[in-house]
Amino acid sequence: MAGKRRAPRSVDLLMTGIIVALGVLLASTAFGLVWRRRTGRLKEQRRTVERAWDFDLGERATLVQFSSAFCAPCRATKRILGEVAEMIPGVSHVEIDAESRLDLVRDLNILKTPTVLVLDRAGKIVQRAAGQPRKADVIAVLGRSIPS
């Protein structure tokens, strides 16, 4: 009776390498999908930040954008928020250079650019998004959080 032939060691190593590579690919894909889903989402501000802003607030709301010089999504965010501000009466858009306003960045815990804050007419932060928000999301948030 002939014994079972065992695969050479090189085949075992190859299979192990393939399994590890597939595991890493699966884990990185899952992480990427979660990160993509979370970035740019407008979320309610949990912590109330009382501060006097050094710019004029909009009659109904203000869209505050923290940007940096070499941030590509910041340019697209500026365009989106500018269009929304033009479209909805009483809403203004303010862009702040994060590098020149490190005091605000620290106070408001801004960790990446672009970061967008939605302020109500009194200057209270009601929504926040880290990353580039979608235009429809910004409009929807303004519709829910500002008085008509």
Image: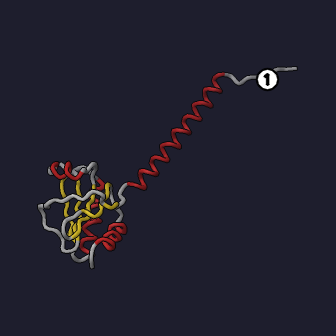
Asked which quadrant contains residue 13, the reply is top right
Residue 23 is situated, as x and y percent measured from the top left of the image, at 55, 39
Q: Amino acid at mark 1?
A: Lys
Foreground pick, 1 / 63: 63
Does residue 26 sit above or below 20 in this rendering? below
Q: What colouring style does the render use?
A: secondary structure
In the displayed structure image, the side of residue 72 where residue 12 appears, left or right:
right
Asked where in the image residue 50 lies, by quadrant, the reply is bottom left
Mark 1 is surrounded, within 10 Å at the Cα level, by few (under 14), some (14 to 19) or many (20 or more) other residues, namely: few
55 displayed left or right of 73: left
Question: What element does badge 1 sit on?
Answer: loop
On the image, the x and y values in percent for residue 105 come to 20, 50
Seen as rendered, the residue at the extreme bottom is 148
Horizontal placement of 29 versus 65: left or right?
A: right
- In percent of width and height, residue 33 lies at 46, 51
Q: Give whichever of 82, 142 is nearer the camera.
A: 142
Q: Is residue 147 above or below residue 124?
A: below
Residue at x 50% of width, y 42% of height: 27
Q: Quadrant of the C terminus?
A: bottom left
The residue pinned by badge 1 equals: 4
The spot of residue 54 in percent (x, y) is: 11, 61
Q: Identify the image quadrant of the N terminus.
A: top right
Q: Residue at x 53, y 43 (%)?
A: 26
Q: What residue appears at the point 33 percent right and 61 percent down from the top-left corner?
A: 44
Residue at image coords 57%, 31%: 17
Which of the 4 quarters of the picture holds residue 55? Answer: bottom left
